[in-house]
Image: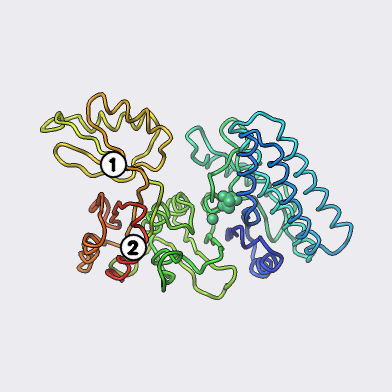
Amino acid sequence: MKVLKFGGTSVGSIKNIKRVKEIITDGDKKIVVLSAMSGTTNVLVGFSENIKAGLVNEALESMDELYAKYQVVIDELFEASELKQEVSNYVDQVFDYLKSLTSEKHNEFLYNKIVSQGELMSTYMFTKYLNQEGVNARLLPALGFMRIDKSNEPDDFYIKQNLQRIIDEALPAEIYITQGFICLDAYGNVANLQRGGSDYTATIIGAVVEADEVQIWTDIDGMHNNDPRFVENTHAISNLSFDEAAELAYFGAKILHPQTVMPAREANIPVRLKNTMDPESYGTLISQDTEGDGVKAIAAKDGITAIKIKSARMLQSHGFLKKVFEIFEKYETSIDMITTSEIAVSLTIDDASNLESIVEELEKFSTVEVDSQQTIVCLAGHSIVKHADTHKLFKVLKDIPVRMISYGGSNNNISLLVNTDDKITALKKLNSYVF
Ligand code: ASP
Ligand code: MG
């Protein structure tokens, strides 16, 4: 069995929905995970923000706009008027529900309920469309099996048991459709796997059903060796190891949700990145095999805050880092990069929501400097720290100020911290030095 995930653009237009149908109807049994139609989740997030800000009219207007788009799709996708009506009724219900939420008090639960609606609509509509086209497809409600535990990790045992039960109870089908992104939390509330989380849904499912392969279908032909938005002439990388792909996804490669690789690596299930707009192209295969030497790809992650913690007490003493780390632990803030000298330590975080409290506590025993608007530029490749050509990347030091360098943490990754303003120069220069 294979698990195929299709992103927002793949289900975002009539043309693409038809393409997806062609791709998945090859006679093999499979589970298909869908995102919301492109743009939908962003609109729903905006809707939630408007409710939070008390802007009810704006919120309602945004729903009317989004609703109009769905009406067009329904009108073009479905033929029989009865079916059109049935799908319209479902979508009407969703929008009525969403609009009714404008009178509720805003909190995280409300946000989660709101953003879950995109995937519910896309999967419902797509399943109905496949049925219209004579495909034996069935909808498996993700909220019936997908659950995270108290530490927001997938509850594999629960997922396996319940997914199996739901498949057994459903009538046999060639294609099972389910929602990406959405899940229940440990207490049974609607939750999600964070923005872009449909990829993660696919590998979680892939691991529990022991799939032969997980395919992530997007609108680009695989993971590129540099960010195609900023650098010209990038190309798709044919093969990546789980480790290389995980580093790239975590450090900014937009094509994959950062946690996606984890379940696949644990269960040793290959993940193939494919392009819905060009199904023949090879894409990127992520597996346990490592192929090729040297730097394979460069990615960048914005929104990083660097914190320098200086203390004379650090000199020849022990336990200093422990004290520092305990503070970050207390505020559940994870540290990405770290470099140390004998009297200071610099580290980076991407979640600055508790920055003030963290700094306050650090200042009790050290001097603290904070730099926001930083970007981590990550270079990944098998054993790059040992590769004969890797030193070339350090030429970038003459082009831009580099705030931190992390080398040797793993063999497959070298990270540089730069001002976000210097990101594009850094990506371009590194591209010319290492490729
Ligand atoms: N629809 C969700 C988002 O836009 C999840 C996903 O597409 O992966 O973030
Ligand atoms: Mg995505």
Question: Which disc number belongs to residue 425?
Answer: 2
Residue 252, position as x, y percentages in the image:
42, 54
**Image coordinates for residue 351, horizontal then vertical, percent:** 41, 40
* Kind of residue at disc 1: Leu
Q: Residue at x 47, y 61 (%)?
A: 270
The one nearer the camera, 358 or 144, is: 358
Assess whether mark 2 and mark 1 are in contact (beta carbons under 8 angstroms): no
Asked if disc 2 is less than 8 Å from ligand 2, the answer is no
Answer with left or right where residue 435 lies relative to residue 46: left
Counting residues from the N terminus, which is met first, the one under dot 1 or under dot 2?
A: 1
Horizontally, is 309 left or right of 272 in the view? left
Count of numbered circles in the view: 2
Residue 366 position, x and y percent, is 22, 29
Foreground tag (1 vs 2): 2
Is 222 left, or right, of 92 in this rendering?
A: left
Mark 2: amino acid: Thr
Badge number at residue 347: 1
Quadrant containing the C terminus is bottom left
Indicate the quadrant where residue 332 lies: top left
Identify the secondary structure beneath mark 2: helix
Above or below: residue 247 compared with residue 340: below
Seen at 22% across and 25% down, the residue is 365
